[in-house]
Amino acid sequence: GGGGERTRADLEAIYSGDLTPSAALTSLSYGLMTRLPSLEVNERIALEALLSVLTSDIASCEKLLRTPIPLGYTRYSVRFLWIWLTLLPFALTNTFVNFGVGTWWEDKPKPVLVLAMLFIGFIFLSIEDIAVQIEEPFAILPLHVQHQWLLRDAEQTRWLMRYGSRE
């Protein structure tokens, strides 16, 4: 009736531009109601609840994607980390001054401080790199395959909607 036509017109307005994930979910929801009349009320409610959870998850991902991380935050955290790593050997010198006393390498050069600094620097700089990747996951992670899958699914949904409007 009139409600179905209004929904179909709304969907056509949504499809006039690029198909977004929320439009695809709207189309799935519409398809559940119109193309699966044999479903019982409880089954429809369960499917709608699952689509609602999926919609919420997609909204969270879109929020992550569109929330910019201040560039100054990353710059200042890296600067602080480099200053801290530069000053750390001065703090560790007293710790390693008596290292090796009473052993066979007492009179040998002591690379322990250098090795400790390399290890600590590697660990902290790796953690910082992981933090940058977590802050901007969509710019760094290889999501091309997932993007192609979503485009394929969107095109299939768009085709189904066009097919359904011909009936």
Image (spheres, rainbow, N blue to C red):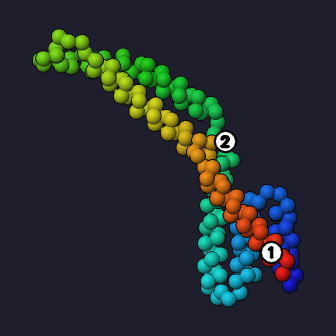
Seen at 36% across and 18% down, the residue is: 89
> Considering only vertical position in the picture, is 144 above or below 27?
above
Q: Residue furthest top?
A: 107
Q: Which residue is mark 2?
A: 68
Q: Dot 1 lies on which element?
A: helix
Write down the residue under mark 1: 163
Q: Residue at x 65, y 86 (%)?
A: 39
> The disc labelled 1 sits on which kind of residue?
Tyr
What is the spatial separation of the Cα atoms under label 1 and label 2, in whole angstroms? Answer: 39 Å
Q: Is residue 62 above or below residue 93?
A: below
Residue 89 vertical position relative to residue 71 in the rendered view, above or below: above
Q: Residues within 10 Å of mark 2 (few under 14, many from 20)?
A: few
Quadrant of the snapshot with the N terminus: bottom right
Residue in view at x 58 percent, y 28 percent: 75
Disc 2, SS: loop
> Residue 48, position in %: x, y?
65, 75
Q: Could you say which quadrant of the image residue 103 lies in?
A: top left
Is residue 26 visible to us here? no
Residue 73 on image: x %, y %: 59, 33
Q: Is residue 155 left or right of residue 48?
A: right
**Label 1: few (<14), some (14–19) or many (≥20) C-alpha neighbours in 10 Å:** few
Q: Between residues 77 and 11, which one lies in front from this camera angle?
A: 11
Residue 90 position within the rendered picture, expressed as x and y whole percent measured from the top left: 36, 16
Instruction: Tell me the residue at 70%/78% (across/down).
Output: 32
Nearer to us in this view, 24 or 165? 165
Query: Which image quadrant for residue 106?
Result: top left
Q: Amino acid at mark 2?
A: Pro
